[in-house]
Amino acid sequence: MDCIAAISTAQTATAIGILRVSGEGCFALCDKVFRAVNHKTFAAQDPRKTVYGEMLDNQGRVIDRGLAVRFSGPHSYTGEDSAEFHCHGSPIVLRELLGALFAAGARQAGPGEFTRRAFLNGKLDLTEAEAVIDLIDAETPAAARNAAAQLDGALRRLLEPVQESLLEITSRFYAVVDYPDEDIQDIGPEEIASSLLTAETALTRLLGTAQRGKILKRGIRTAIVGRPNAGKSSLLNALAGYERAIVTDIPGTTRDTVEESVLCGGVQLRLIDTAGIRETEDTVERLGVERSRRAMESADLVLCVVDGTQGVTCEDEELLRCAARCKNWVLVLSKKDLFPAAYAGSLSPAAVVSLSNVTGEGLEELEGVIAALFPVGSAADAGTLLTDARQEEAVLRAKAAVGRAREALEAGFTPDAILTDAEEALEAIGELTGRTAKEEIVGRIFSRFCVGK
Ligand SMILES: Nc1nc2c(ncn2[C@@H]2O[C@H](COP(=O)(O)OP(=O)(O)OP(=O)(O)O)[C@@H](O)[C@H]2O)c(=O)[nH]1
Ligand SMILES: [Mg+2]
């Protein structure tokens, strides 16, 4: 493929900046912009070892002095011949060198193009390619750990047994039908049933991780709801550590949702402070209240704030019942510094926390409650969470197809009736990993069964 180049590091003044080049004729191109102190050409440099030298513009003037590394395909990130230049991290220097690489014949790499080439050259599957982005974008240590493990193939390895069981069914079936002269044993219903069960169990387990995966990646959508003046905005500010939202003693201060992201117990909370919920004639406030209700409905976690000095009133009770529709809801009794309230109602929130937004007492307890509700997960399952809607959809489709196949088998259909569904499941998993199902089946027939010799 043609030669692409890009600046790989941040385009602000930094100590070191890195440029990357990859593609056909990469080394000859690098000779035009780099003069090594050892006087060797780029192609003659040791692979994967840095060499010091001068970076040149297209008129041979020295732009900078620094290090270059040569990677020979296929032993490179992209799988192609490629190179890196480590210069001083001046945006000007980096742009000059990039210009020199363009003048020498490279073109600007598109977004993700290096990783795309790595995928096309079989260096990464799609789950691993997605993990590259997740790793770069990770906002918490746990999200980074998960992405790193997924990049190492954790998700692919989890899918392999599923793929294996389904391939077993389809390839054996095809082999028997397409090569009747070869002595290949027919696949029996018990064997099919056991393969389908293996596949279905693994897919079900995987789907069960999607919610945690999503939370890991985008944080916990946390709606702070309650009646006017309960102390919602004060709680947002206390958790954020600064005066994010306006706080006054006038009921109805917050009219629109206010969002802020904070790190809590190793997880990212996407806090949404909302307008106090009450009946109102005010058009703006009413719209705000609607937004509060919507935020509550779509939240992963609801913090229902009640003014501790007032106790839980009838209006509060009604609100608590709405909050209770969310699987994870916590009752927060505020203003503990004025009155240490308790809850004796009939609803059962995940926890009741009495706290003061003024003194900070009880905040730590709330953080502990949240951390317990959303455990970061053990190191063992890192990389095996579905973190992406695309991945989830593909697994869902694969599981549905496997389920249909199993039902057909139980209903007494012959194996060929199962085949279409098994293939559909393989197709869906193929989309997930980027390996095409057809190719896999054909490959399997010829390698495992030695058909046709
Ligand atoms: N002493 C004490 N006062 C608090 C506490 N939390 C909030 N307040 C006070 O209660 C009043 C209302 O606080 P807000 O945080 O604005 O309440 P809110 O729930 O956001 O109210 P709306 O935006 O009107 O719905 C303010 O005067 C706060 O200073 C607390 O824990 N202790
Ligand atoms: Mg408010």
Image (cartoon, helix red, strand yellow):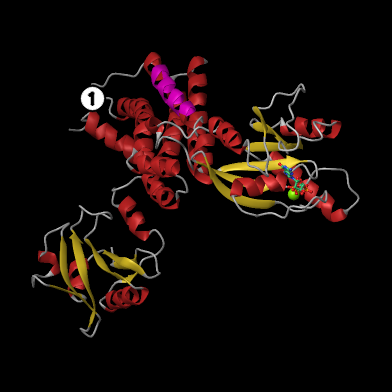
Which residue is at 48% across, 33% downward? 398
**Between residues 73 and 69, which one lies in front from this camera angle?**
69
Residue ID at (36%, 55%): 116
Q: Which residues are magenta?
A: 193-205
The quadrant of the image that shows the N terminus is bottom left
Identity of the residue drawn at 79% across and 46% down: 290
Q: Main secondary structure of the magenta part?
A: helix
Q: Given the current orientation, which residue lies at the most extreme right position?
A: 281
Could you tell me residue 90's position as x and y percent? 34, 73
Is 271 inside the magenta-drawn segment? no
Whether residue 435 can be seen here: no
In this orientation, which residue lies closer to the viewer: 244 or 274? 244
Q: Position of residue 191 (x, y in %)?
A: 37, 17
The amino acid type found where label 1 is placed reads Glu
Left or right, 72 with respect to 309, comes to left
| Location of residue 204 with respect to 383 vertically, above or below | above
Q: Is residue 210 above or below residue 263?
A: above
Taking depth in this image into account, of 157 and 69 the one nearest to the observer is: 69
Residue count near mark 1 (Cα–Cα under 10 Å), binned few <14, some 14–19, many ≥20: few
- In depth, the one of 143 and 31 nearer the eye is 143
In terms of secondary structure, where does tag 1 sit? loop
**Quadrant in the picture for residue 91:** bottom left
Say which residue appears at 52% left-offset and 25% top-offset. Answer: 404
Q: Is residue 277 left or right of residue 41?
A: right
Specify whether residue 68 is in view.
Answer: yes
43 lies left or right of 440: left
Q: Quadrant of the C terminus?
A: top left
The total number of labels drawn is: 1
Residue under numbered circle 1: 182
* Residue 248, percent from left and from top: 77, 52
Q: Position of residue 27 (x, y in %)?
A: 18, 67
* In the image, residue 202 lies in the stretch drawn in magenta: yes
